[in-house]
């Protein structure tokens, strides 16, 4: 079970890196990339799996923190879906939408690491 948990943590961090790194790489010309979209999906799926493993095991779960992170992750996912659909059609992605994806990812990372 530990291997699965650590593998999910690894994938969860990669998802965050894809979202945040894609935002930084395109900061001057904001858009939503395929990797940000994939990272948003990975964040939601692996995050929920990690909570399930924690609930099933001996790891304590802060339900308020998890609720906050789920809401933020869903905002990121919805913004990434909308932005990626626009970008893949060749339409302009609004600056606010593109920055919402990366900025909310930054907030989600802060919540994950600073809230104990």
Image: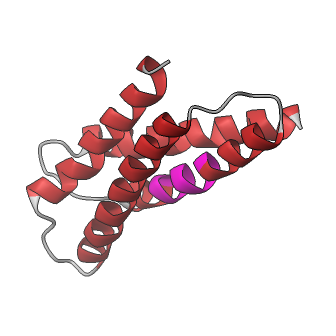
Image quarter for residue 111? Answer: top left
Colour scheme shown: secondary structure
Find out whether residue 63 is within the magenta segment: no
Give how far across and how far down residue 99 sits, in percent.
18, 48
Is 60 situated left or right of 20 in this image? right
Looking at the rendered image, the quarter that the N terminus falls into is top right
Which secondary structure type mostly characterizes the magenta part of the structure?
helix
Is 41 situated left or right of 77 in this image? right
The residue sitting at the right extreme is: 1
Image quarter for residue 78? Answer: bottom left
Find out whether residue 41 is within the magenta segment: yes
Q: Residue at x 32, y 68 (%)?
A: 84
Give how far across and how far down residue 48 sits, in percent.
62, 51
Is residue 37 depicted above or below 101 in this figure?
Answer: below
Q: Residue at x 38, y 37 (%)?
A: 108
- Which segment did they paint magenta? 39-47
Is residue 107 depicted above or below 43 in this figure?
Answer: above
- Looking at this view, is 72 or 57 the one in front? 57
Give how far across and how far down residue 69 sits, in percent.
44, 42
Is residue 34 depicted above or below 70 in this figure?
Answer: below
Give how far across and how far down residue 110 sits, in percent.
37, 26
Is residue 15 depicted above or below 61 in this figure?
Answer: below
Is 39 situated left or right of 103 in this image? right
Q: Residue at x 52, y 45 (%)?
A: 15
The residue sitting at the bottom extreme is: 89
Count of numbered circles in the view: 0
């Amino acid at each position: 079970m530990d291997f699965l948990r650590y593998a999910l943590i690894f994938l969860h961090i990669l998802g965050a890196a894809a979202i945040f790194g894609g935002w930084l790489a395109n900061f001057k010309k904001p858009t939503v990339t395929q990797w940000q979209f994939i990272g948003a999906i990975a964040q939601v799926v692996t995050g929920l799996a990690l909570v399930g493993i924690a609930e099933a095991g001996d790891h304590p779960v802060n339900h308020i923190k998890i609720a906050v992170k789920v809401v933020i992750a869903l905002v990121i996912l919805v913004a990434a879906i909308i932005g990626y659909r626009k970008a893949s059609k060749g339409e302009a992605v609004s600056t606010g939408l593109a920055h919402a994806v990366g900025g909310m990812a930054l907030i989600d990372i802060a919540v994950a690491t600073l809230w104990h």
